[in-house]
Image (cartoon, rainbow, N blue to C red):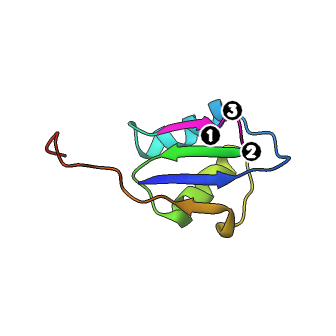
Amino acid sequence: MEFQVDIPGQPADVGAIREALCAVDPAALADVDPLNPVLRISANVSTRELQDLLRQGGLGVEVAAIRPQASNCCGGCGG
């Protein structure tokens, strides 16, 4: 699942967030959009799980700040 997390004015320790995410999903990805205050995440977790993992990574956000994204999977790789 892909998510965008609004983080205006909040510093995000992407390394700590990745560590928390990868403890649950080793294939998880996280980065910060260089043009917007948005954390981009790809992980096999629910919105509530993501909120808890972000807190473990030092970023406290409300569920409303976490926006699940529509799937962009074309099915071509068989996944």
Q: CA distance from mark 3 to mark 2?
A: 8 Å
Q: Secondary structure at mark 3?
A: loop
**Residue 35 in the image: x percent, y percent?**
71, 36
Pointer 3 with pointer 2, Cβ within 8 A:
no
Q: Which residue is mark 3?
A: 34
For the point 55% across and 66% down, which residue is it?
48
Which residues, given as a range, are shown in magenta? Answer: 29-36
For the point 73% across and 59% down, which residue is it?
61
How crowded is the residue under tag 2: few (<14 C-alpha within 10 Å), some, or many (20+)?
Answer: some
Q: Residue furthest bottom?
A: 64
Q: Residue furthest right?
A: 9
**Residue 50 in the image: x percent, y percent?**
55, 56
Pointer 1 with pointer 3, Cβ within 8 A:
no
Q: Which residue is mark 2?
A: 37
How crowded is the residue under tag 3: few (<14 C-alpha within 10 Å), some, or many (20+)?
Answer: few
- Answer whether residue 40 is magenta in the image: no
Q: CA distance from mark 1 to mark 3?
A: 17 Å
Observer-side mark, 1 or 3, equals 3
* Amino acid type, label 2: Pro
* Amino acid type, label 3: Pro
Looking at the image, tell me whether mark 1 or mark 3 is earlier in sequence order. 1
Pointer 1 with pointer 2, Cβ within 8 A:
no
For the point 52% across and 54% down, which residue is it?
3
Q: Secondary structure at mark 2?
A: loop
**Residue 6 in the image: x percent, y percent?**
70, 54
Quarter of the image that includes the N terminus: bottom left
Q: Is residue 44 above or below residue 26?
A: below
Q: Which residue is mark 1?
A: 17
